[in-house]
Amino acid sequence: MAKQYIPSNIAVIGMEWGDEGKGKIIDFLAAKADVVARFNGGNNAGHTIEVDNKKIVLHLIPSGVMHKNKLVVGNGLVIDPKVLLQEIKFLERNNIKISPENLVISENAHVILPHHIEEDKKVGGKLGTTARGIGPAYTDKTARIGLKVYEFVDDAIFKKRFGEEEFYREYKQYAETLKSFVGDTAIIINNAIDNNKKVIFEGAQGTLLDIDHGTYPFVTSSNAIAGGVCTGLGISPKKVQSVLGVCKAYKTRVGMGPFPTEITSAIGEKIQKTGKEFGATTGRQRRVGWFDAVIGKYSVMINGIDSIALTKLDVFTTINKLKICVAYKHKGNIIKDFTTNMKILQNCQPIYEEFDGWWDDLSKIRIYDKLPNNAKKYLRRIEELLKVPFSIVSVGPKREQTIVARNEFLF
Ligand code: GDP
Ligand code: IMO
Ligand code: MG
């Protein structure tokens, strides 16, 4: 059951197939945090923050950039050094200073090199990957032939392994620039936790893209679930105090793979357009579906979610009837528990409950009670089905378009 004390650290986890709005929620929470630490993935992620008419999409650097947080990139990531340096420059052009004072990169993270990207472009198409070299870099890590960041920035090692490659000279320069950002992030994070600093663990992707617990093979190559916090940063499970699941009022998915509640009618198109559902990394159109409580319950179980930040409720305004999937039908049987068995999942039909919509503009509402009754009914049903309360309801992309429904789960 949900905890009832103010946590000093919060893991922010995507509950579905990524793009739930983690960046926005983390930026909102980061105002009160000391450290924001990424623990998985790489620049396949695209985390959007909107403040004062400025929109920033982050791929590698944690979503605490708008505040004075310490930013940590953990050992669980695969890092494209070229992209990382571009991102630092991009932020500097936006008057956000990134230096070794506020950004530390784990010496144990792995490096994405050009051949990983080439390989991903060749073979990733079947899965609809982001073609950023993520899978091939994690493959090398698991095969124990990867290049760790500390090896990359030590030219004696980097040259010995890759000195003959065409990319060596270019990448050697990246290594030199990045060297001063590299450190032992496990010590930094553990010290921060032990000194009662407020820490946000920033998940990339989402539960159903997790390599172990997602819709394999249509997944990414890292652990995006709350368990990934421990392996991806080097902290004990006993130290993770709270898990905040981020989910959309409806569902989206980029790339291939089963999607039981996918909407193929004009309503799907309307949601896709109103919600501006285009990938923050690849620009691809996101597939859209109704809220799926079977997935929601699964995500709550796998991550131990204490409270939920529900995003994009505003997008539903003017949609006459809303649906929530409460179970699946499979070959005449009712399935209430999510399965990652693709043979079954591909042939599941959703069983829906229907809800009346609303016509009010939600984007200026800041108090939960002021939401239209039909919106509250919709939210209440999700809470009932998932057995987890909402701590945040988001009604727009901007930081201030945020309703704090319950404070006790947040900083
Ligand atoms: P992330 O990968 O989980 O950080 O999510 P993305 O940034 O890839 O995608 C979420 C998109 O929805 C971004 O464009 C956000 O600006 C936007 N967004 C976040 N919360 C809301 C919300 O409550 N309402 C609307 N309309 N947009 C939102
Ligand atoms: P954020 O952190 C949405 C998807 C890709 C593809 C699959 C595998 O912004 O939520 P990969 O390049 O990781 O090997 O691709 O995973 N994918 C994402 N979808 N949001 C993401 O990150 C994603 N990162 C990867 O579209 O289906
Ligand atoms: Mg995204």
Image (cartoon, helix red, strand yellow):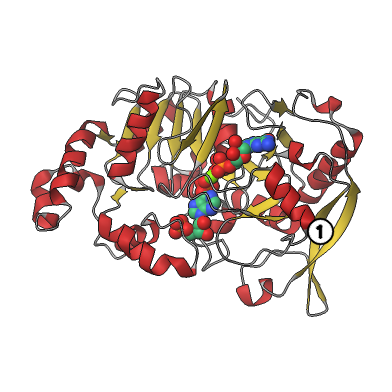
Q: Identify the secondary structure beneath mark 1.
A: strand
- Image quadrant in which you'd find residue 62: top left
Q: Position of residue 43 (x, y in %)?
A: 41, 47
Residue wearing tag 1: 326
Q: Residue at x 35, y 45 (%)?
A: 75
- Image quadrant in which you'd find residue 106: top left
Residue 12 in sight here: no
- Image quadrant in which you'd find residue 248: top right
Residue farthest to the bottom? 331
Q: Is residue 263 left or right of residue 79?
A: right
Q: Is residue 235 left or right of residue 143?
A: right
Residue 152 in sight here: yes
Q: Quadrant of the N terminus?
A: top right
- The 10 Å Cα crowd at callout 1, few under 14, some 14 to 19, many 20 or more, is many
Q: Residue at x 51, y 24 (%)?
A: 33
Q: Is residue 76 left or right of residue 6?
A: left
Q: Quadrant of the C terminus?
A: top right
Q: Position of residue 381 (x, y in %)?
A: 85, 46
Q: Position of residue 370 (x, y in %)?
A: 85, 25
Work out whether 212 lies above or below 172. below
Amino acid type at circle 1 is Val
Q: Position of residue 81 (x, y in %)?
A: 28, 43
Q: Residue at x 45, y 43 (%)?
A: 236
